[in-house]
Image (cartoon, rainbow, N blue to C red):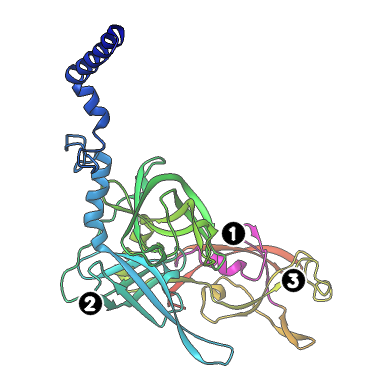
Amino acid sequence: MRPRALIMTLVLVGAFWLITSRGNWSVERLMRPISSSGKLWTEPVTAHGAGTFGADEQNNIDIYKTSHLATVNITSVVYQRNMFFQVFPTKGMGSGFIINEDGEIVTNKHVIAGSSKVQVTLSDQKQYDAEVLGIDSRDDLAILKINAGHKLPSLPLGDSDKIQVGQKVLAIGNPFGLGGTLTTGIVSSLGRSLDNEDGVPMEGLIQTDAAINPGNSGGPLLDSNGNVIGVNTAILGSQTASGQAGSIGIGFAMPITRVKAMLEEYRATGHISRAVLGVSNVVYIPEGWQFSENLSLPSTGGLLIQQVEDGSPAAAAGLRGATRAVNFGFNRLGIGGDLIVAIDGKPVEGQDSLTRAMLQKRGGESLQLTVYRDGRTMKVAVKLGSAPETLR
């Protein structure tokens, strides 16, 4: 080997030795992902490594550990007829939560509507048949009860009047049949309005971006202290492959204050009441109906009262039903009664206008009707009665 080549070789070897001996820590840091055995290398656990959680994560974990024990899955069985008039059962799924150790459960009315049998599955997978204690169509709520034979975990009811836009919320439920699912988010807005499946407006809803999907209905919306501040009720969503609506981050919950009002009435009376008017039948007369002038009715249309029940709030307020009948082809129409043209100051827009208005009322409240009678318009205030509401 030539002297110059030998010198260069010694210099390179010396430099390599210097780097690998004095700079050993730096080289090791770069190479640590793979050990000498060829296996993946992992960092030792430190104060910020695996096994520890941030304050918000720990809050989520703590709330879930206790709250999911009192969150239940609800299966409702509805019997239907097929095209051959054969009866077959169909099942629907939802969620609910236990409110006391005796097994009373709150859920949505639409979770159990039309069901012949309601079954509740607890977090330990034990199943119980549930009794429907009462429903509240106005707020899409229902109370169930199971007899487990022992005390059950329950969730504390919070105060939805104090919640703020931006605060953290947690939802637990049974989305797509996946029981015990936790999602988190914030309160996105307050005081939202949304029509339910019957076209009846639900007012004052909590909007959240916590993921809520089919099956979450009836489950609890919790604050960061683990208190229930709402009942997850509805979503705006996109269609999934199965035809169901999936979450797009816009969900709605019924405020827990409505649940408290329902429970207060149930504790006091043993039932949940619906408002009673006492008008048993009305017929919608559309605007501009061609026979309106012949029947001495205004062109604006409205709801023509067919019958007023004796002794009812409507009768006490002086509302009038039909006095005679006329035939329109195969249809018979009672005329001579009051035509309701507005309800609480809002014009009548369809056959269900009165039903929708009544679902917003409770017994003892007042309903103001604008009626057309004998060629003139007048206002009639009716103090509504009440009767136990039954599951339909």
Alpha carbon separation for disc pair 3 and 2: 58 Å
Q: Nearer the viewer, mark 3 or mark 2?
A: 2
Up/down of 182 relative to 106, above or below: above
Give the number of the disc on residue 344.
Answer: 1
- Residue 374: mark: 3
Left or right, 60 with reference to 320: left
> Seen from this angle, which residue lies furthest top?
4
Q: Give the mark nearest the N terminus, 1 or 2.
A: 2
- The magenta-colored residue range is 337-363
Name the residue type under label 2: Asn
Image mark for residue 147: 2
**Among numbered discs 3 and 1, the one appearing first in the sequence:** 1
Residue 36 in the magenta stretch? The answer is no
Does residue 265 appear in this view? no
Q: Secondary structure at mark 3?
A: loop
- Quadrant assignment, res 266: bottom left
